[in-house]
Image (spheres, rainbow, N blue to C red):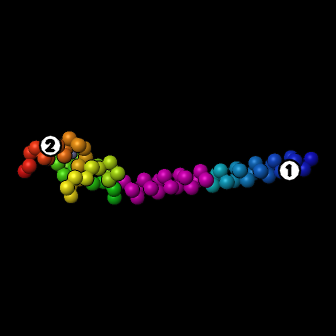
Amino acid sequence: MSKIIIILLLGFIIYKVGKNAAYLALENMFGNKTLKEPEDLVKCTFCERLVSEDLVIKHKDHVFCSQDCIDASINKPS
Ligand SMILES: [Zn+2]
């Protein structure tokens, strides 16, 4: 009979932990989003488009949004 109590207890713990984990995951997601988005945007040197720093291509001390912009800036130096 004590098995039922153990199962109920385990269920309660899993429920509690799961709820906590879900809450933390949500907090992380939203916390990161609100903090990350404005700070991590950089301007492409060529077309001036705003790109996430993770996706940007660095080339000779300049940042570009794509290989096309690097090629274009090389072909047409201003
Ligand atoms: Zn660009």
Q: Is residue 9 left or right of residue 20?
A: right
Specify start and end residues of the magenta stretch as a single range. 21-38
Q: Is residue 32 visible?
A: yes
Q: Is residue 44 left or right of residue 54?
A: left
Q: Nearer the viewer, residue 54 or 39?
A: 54
**Mark 2 surroundings: few (<14), some (14-19) or many (≥20) residues within 10 A:** few
Q: Nearer the viewer, residue 1 or 78?
A: 78
Residue at coordinates 19% horizontally, 55% vertically from top-left?
60
Residue with the mark numbered 1: 5
The furthest residue to the right: 1
Going by the numbered disc 1, the residue's amino acid type is Ile
Residue with the mark numbered 2: 72
**Which percent across, then down, holds residue 21?**
61, 53
The furthest residue to the top: 68
Q: Is residue 10 left or right of residue 76?
A: right
Q: Main secondary structure of the magenta part?
A: helix
The furthest residue to the front: 60
Residue 29 colored in magenta in the image: yes
Q: Is residue 50 visible?
A: no
**Mark 1 surroundings: few (<14), some (14-19) or many (≥20) residues within 10 A:** few
Residue at coordinates 67% horizontally, 54% vertically from top-left?
17
* Res. 72 image quadrant: top left
61 relative to 15, above or below: below
